Image (spheres, helix red, strand yellow):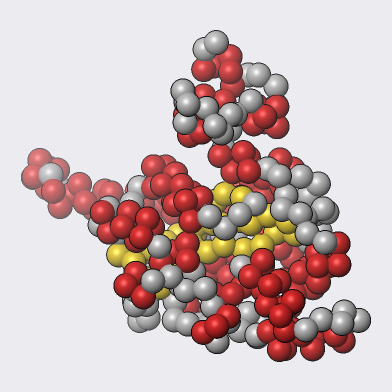
Amino acid sequence: MSKKKLQETGNLTTRASLVQPRSKKLSVRRQCDLLAVHRSRIYYKPRPEKPENLKMMQLMDRHLLDHPTEGVLSVVHLLRDRGYPVGPKRVRRLFRLLGHQTIYRRRNLTKMGLKVFIKPYLLRGLDISRPNQVWSTDITYIPMRRGFMYLTAIIDVYSRRIVGWGISNSLAARWCLEVLQEAIAEHGTPEIINSDQGVQYTCAGWTQYLEKNGINISMDGKGRATDNIWIERFWKSLKYNHVYLNPAEDGGELAEGIEGYINYYNQKIHSTTKQKPNDRYQQKTTLVSLEHNLETNPLINLAS
């Protein structure tokens, strides 16, 4: 069957069901390309959890979205006030499931990577004046009607455009790297990538890939959620304006909803830049390319 006919086979959910992750003949990447399916759809099954824990996680997520530096003991008191008789041990586990452990300050609650792969924060005082100069990335928990999943996204800091994203039911480092590789393939290579110090970003696979491709690595300080404020603000916008209002039934519905919101977000006026992220990204990219051509092409310089 031709690639065109494969892509016309049913809807996205149907085509996603045709992907065979364990195939020895075709990689998942190649199967998704043939079927025109984003790989985030392959990990469509929500992660299960006890109903009471899911309710507590939703409360915690809303609270930590507004107060990202609060720790286990504060959340224990919050949940007890809401009628949940929890202790620190249980809340620590929920912190880990939420992916908030990288923000919490105390060493024994923070799953850091190997120290050799932890890099300094490069953005303090930096003049960010063009697209692809700095990308910022993070992972967040996404509640659903039954279970939850994780979302990773990459934002171009200059334009505030979301240049890459994916969903998964695990926090696997390989998943984050695949989303980055797809973003680079579509938008080009950034000069700097900023992230927190989570294991996904301090592992050898992530850091070695960035270094091999000449990308400078910047990492937030311990407990400094404000160092990655651009992606944190996007999480807040996404959750309050879409996720909490439209809890998804399954991964396919979640992926469609998030894709729709990101398209909307990239095309609406941003409150800080006063421009649409897509327009700001494309206009400046075109200008930078033109300036580069004027500097490097002697015929253009001569004609001018």
Q: Residue at x 10, y 40 (%)?
A: 299
Q: Residue at x 72, y 53 (%)?
A: 47
| Nearest to the observer: residue 259 or residue 304 | 259
**Looking at the figure, which quarter contains the N terminus?**
top right
Query: Looking at the picture, how far across and down is residue 245, in whole percent?
Result: 81, 59
Question: Can you see residue 260?
Answer: no
Which quarter of the figure has residue 153?
A: bottom right
Q: Residue at x 58, y 70 (%)?
A: 232
Q: How many marks?
A: 0
Question: Can you see residue 74?
Answer: yes
Q: Is residue 109 left or right of residue 137?
A: right
Q: Residue at x 51, y 24 (%)?
A: 34
| Nearest to the observer: residue 107 or residue 16 | 107
Q: Compared to 157, does 162 lie above or below?
A: above
Query: Looking at the picture, how far across and down is residue 236, in whole percent?
Result: 66, 68
Query: Looking at the picture, how far across and down is residue 115, in whole percent?
Result: 36, 75
Q: Residue furthest right?
A: 83
Q: Residue furthest top?
A: 1
| Nearest to the observer: residue 278 or residue 5 | 5
Q: Is residue 289 left or right of residue 238?
A: left
Q: Compared to 231, does 102 lie above or below?
A: below
Query: Looking at the picture, how far across and down is residue 274, in whole percent?
Result: 54, 65
| Nearest to the observer: residue 129 or residue 32 | 32
Q: Compared to 20, does 174 lie above or below?
A: below
